[in-house]
Image: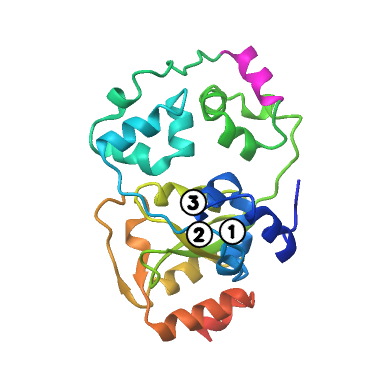
Amino acid sequence: MVRYWTKELVQEEALKYNSRKEFHIKHCGAYLAASRNGWLDKVCSHMEFVLKSWTKELVQEEALKYNSRKEFNIKSKGAYNFAKRNGLVDEVCSHMGPGYTSWTKELVQEEALKYNSRKEFNIKSKGAYEFAKRNGLVDEVCSHMETQVLIDVVYMWNTVENPHIWKFGISNHYTYEKRINKVLSQTEYMLNEVLWIQTTDANKIETKLLKLGTPHIFPNIVDGKTEFRYLSKNDEQKVKAIFTTSNVSELFE
C-alpha cells in the first residue's frame, strides 16, 4: 500500500486510466494527491475529457455490465444517479441478483476479519458494519484492527464544470474523502480540485471561510448544500495559497 504519493508515483498510477472519472473511482488516494499538489492537469494530460449525457437507453446498456446495484452505484455513479432520479432503478437492475446478506454476529465477525481498519470495513462492507453498529458489536468485531486517532481537517473542493464555486467542510483525515464523494454523488459533475489542512480550530475556521464570497445553492444537493460559496479570483487565490502552505490561520490575521 502506498502511504505517501510522490509526483512520479501518481503519474505512474494515472497512466493506467483513460479518464479522470475512472482515475478518481479506481484510485481516489492518488487522484486526491494529484489534486492537492496541483499535478492533476499534468498527470491526466493523456486522458480523454468525457462528460456523458445519460439517457434511459444508455443507462440500461450500462447497467447490464454489473451484477448488483452496489457494484453499479460504485462503478458508474452518474448512470446510477440518473436511474434513481428518474425512477428507473428497478427496471434497469431487473437482471441483477438481490445482493442482500442476512447478517448475523458470526457472519459479521468473519467479514470484519478481511479488513485492517474500521474505515475500510465501513466502506467495503457497509451492510455488515451497520449491523455491527446497530447491535453494539463494532468494538468486539474490530478488535484486531489498528487503532485510529482522528485528526480534524478543514477541506475545500470544486468541480470541473464550476471551478469558481467551492464547497467547504470539516471532517477528519479518515472520512473527508467519503464526505466529498457523498455530496458529489448527488450531482453529474466531475471533481476537479481538493485542498485540505489539519487544524485544532476546524469549526472556527469553517465559520470564517463561509463568510467569504457569495452563497450558491445547487438544487439537487441535499448534504451540505449551504456550504457552497462562489469565490472571486482574489479570494480563491488567497485561500488556496494558505491551504497549500499549511497555514490557514493566516487567513484571519
- Residue that numbered label 1 is attached to: 32
- Classify 10 Å Cα crowding around label 3: few (below 14), some (14-19), many (20 and above): many
At label 2, which amino acid type do we have? Ile
- The residue located at (31%, 51%) in the rendering is 221
Q: Is residue 59 above or below residue 205?
A: above
* Quadrant position of the N terminus in the picture: top right
- Classify 10 Å Cα crowding around label 2: few (below 14), some (14-19), many (20 and above): many
Q: Secondary structure at mark 1?
A: helix
- Helix, strand or loop for the magenta stretch, by majority: helix
- The residue located at (59%, 71%) in the rendering is 38
- Residue that numbered label 3 is attached to: 21
Whole-angstrom CA distance, mark 2 to mark 1, is 16 Å
The picture places residue 222, in percent across and down from the top left corner, at 31, 49
Residue 106 located within the stretch drawn in magenta: yes
Closer to the chain start, of discs 3 and 2, is 3
Q: Is residue 123 left or right of residue 75?
A: right
Residues in magenta, as a range = 104-113
The picture places residue 61, in percent across and down from the top left corner, at 36, 31
Q: Is residue 190 left or right of residue 18?
A: left
- The residue located at (32%, 30%) in the rendering is 60
- Residue that numbered label 2 is attached to: 170
Mark closer to the observer (3, 1): 3
Closer to the chain start, of discs 2 and 1, is 1
At label 1, which amino acid type do we have? Leu
Tell me whether circle 3 and circle 1 mark residues in contact (CB < 8 Å): no
| Number of numbered discs overlaid on the protein picture | 3
Residues 40 and 125: in front is 40
